[in-house]
Image: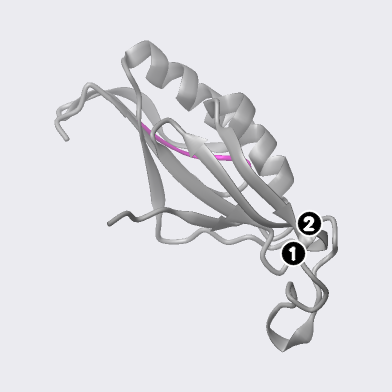
Amino acid sequence: MQIQPYLFFDGRCEEAVSFYRDSLGAEVVMLLRYSDAPPGEADCPGGTQPPADKVMHAALRIGQTQVMASDGFATGHPEFKGVSLSLTADDDAHARRLFDALAAGGQVQQPLGPSFFASSFGMVTDRFGVAWMVIAGGQG
């Protein structure tokens, strides 16, 4: 069994995919736009149709994990509350590169540094509102 995060960027998915490709080395495994669906198959609840150029479904491979993404209803108001993505780096230098890349245009919640449970740990919310915990040299 697997659990895979599915992030709804509410109109900014393509921008987010590009950002994660550049900052985290994400590989785009699949990207479908609403225009790729047969007529009537991409309607949202209530019968509304998202803009044809928006992302209906994307799959990204980040390291060994697949993260899915979409523009969802494409209303321009993404919300990511009550969840963080934990990103395990190879070493402290790698953690620094990942953390700094995610922090560009975002907001640092806890600066990256040593802790009692890891040689590097920090928390950042990226420019899209997705919360990340970056860790290296940890116990779990």
Say which element carries label 2.
Answer: loop
Residue at position x 57%, y 61% in the image: 79
Front one among 39 and 81? 39
Residue closest to the eye, 22 or 98 = 22
Q: Please tell me whether residue 12 is drawn above or below residue 34 in the rendered image.
A: above
Residue 107 in percent (x, y) is at 54, 38
Residue position for label 2: 54
Q: Which residue is mark 1?
A: 74
Q: Is residue 118 above or below residue 42?
A: above
Q: Amino acid at mark 1?
A: Ala
Give above or below for 120 relative to 5. Answer: above
Majority secondary structure of magenta residues: strand
What segment is highlighted magenta in the picture?
A: 122-127
Upstream in the sequence, badge 1 or badge 2? 2
The N terminus sits in image quarter: bottom left
Left or right of 58? Residue 86 is: left
User: In terms of image quadrants, where is residue 136?
Assistant: top left
Neighbor class of circle 2 (other Cα within 10 Å; few <14, some 14-19, many 20+) is: many
